Image (cartoon, grey):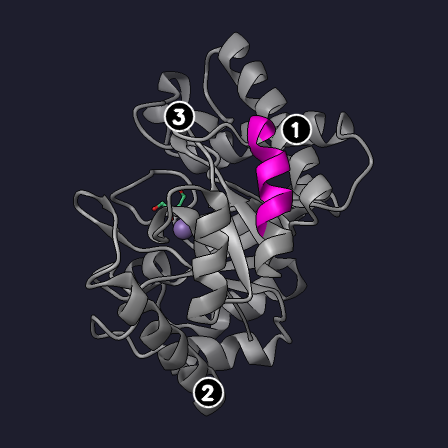
Amino acid sequence: MQLAIQTLLLPGRDLIEKFDCAAQFGFGGVEIAVGPHLDLASQTPMVHQAMASSGLAVAGICTHPIHDPIVPDVKERHLRLAKLTELVQLADELGATGVVCVPVRPPHRFPEFADKENHEELLTAYAVDVFQEWTATLPAGRAALFLEPLNRYETYFLNRVEQAVLLARAIHHPRIQVLADFFHMNIEEGDWSAPIAKAGRLLGMVHVADNNRLQQGRGCLNFQPGFAALKQVGYRSFISIECWSPKGPLIDGDPATALPETVQFLQQAWENA
Ligand code: LER
Ligand code: MN
């Protein structure tokens, strides 16, 4: 298994120290979280240094709500899509598998669809048009855009993996893939294997946290059935740790001892799956 962790969860004053810590803790990759706190374009020399010094790969780039592209304002939408193009190009430059994308979440809404019974269908058709137009403008490269479903308390569009799979199939572009986040799946899915089987080869990235969104082993989730489902579809890409507390990204305990334990816990669960 290829285990990664998001930058916001790692100790260290800069990306070089964070990557070095991730290597010491036993991870194979780092998922770089971008947003108002980090403009990746200005940091690429440091990321190259961090990769060289730690020997770790950039697993992926995790975006922030400021990057969600399906927003009603046309000018704002184009700015966000241009930023996603920049991030996908940076992912290629850094050898990362791709960029996480939540299509839309509150407060952005589409009042013209909101009251309609077929709200989801209309919004899906709208999103398909936007993503198809965007993929047609993508410069050559391999890095993917991972469509991420979030649970019902975080968004009203794409809550289950199957919905992201249907959207990805409708967009029908080799660089549009799907992300399965075990925290959201634990809230929204009826079981682990059917959604993961439906995603199959479209599954490009996995996020994991326990049911309380702390690191694995600090809640009551059993990771083996989900890992067995990943093995069943031959998933070989990164499984990335994404933990949150109500105050923001957080690892419970001292990361220097808690994170190596988490690595061991997940490796054991993978072996037993
Ligand atoms: C948010 O809950 C999440 O899971 C992230 O990966 C995307 O912002
Ligand atoms: Mn996630």
Q: Residues within 10 Å of mark 3 (few under 14, many from 20)?
A: few
Viewer-proximal residue among 176 and 239: 239
Residue at horizontal 70%, vertical 25%?
133
Label 3 amino acid? Pro
Name the residue tied to disc 3: 36
| Residue 96 located left or right of residue 122 | right
The stretch drawn in magenta includes residue 88: no
User: What whole-number distance in Å separates the C-alpha atoms at marks 2 and 1?
Assistant: 37 Å
Name the residue tied to disc 2: 273
Any part of residue 70 in sight: yes
Residue farthest along the bottom direction in this orientation: 272
User: What whole-number distance in Å separates the C-alpha atoms at marks 3 and 1?
Assistant: 17 Å
Q: Is residue 266 above or below residue 250?
A: below
Residue at horizontal 77%, vertical 28%?
136
Label 2 amino acid? Ala
Viewer-proximal residue among 36 and 222: 36
Of the residues tagged 3 and 2, which is closer to the observer? 3
Q: Are marks 3 and 1 in contact (CB under 8 Å)?
A: no
Question: Which structural element holds mark 2?
Answer: loop
Label 1 amino acid? Thr
Name the residue tied to disc 1: 85
| Residue 57 located left or right of residue 17 | right
Any part of residue 145 in sight: no
Q: Main secondary structure of the magenta part?
A: helix
Q: Position of residue 91 (x, y in %)?
A: 65, 41
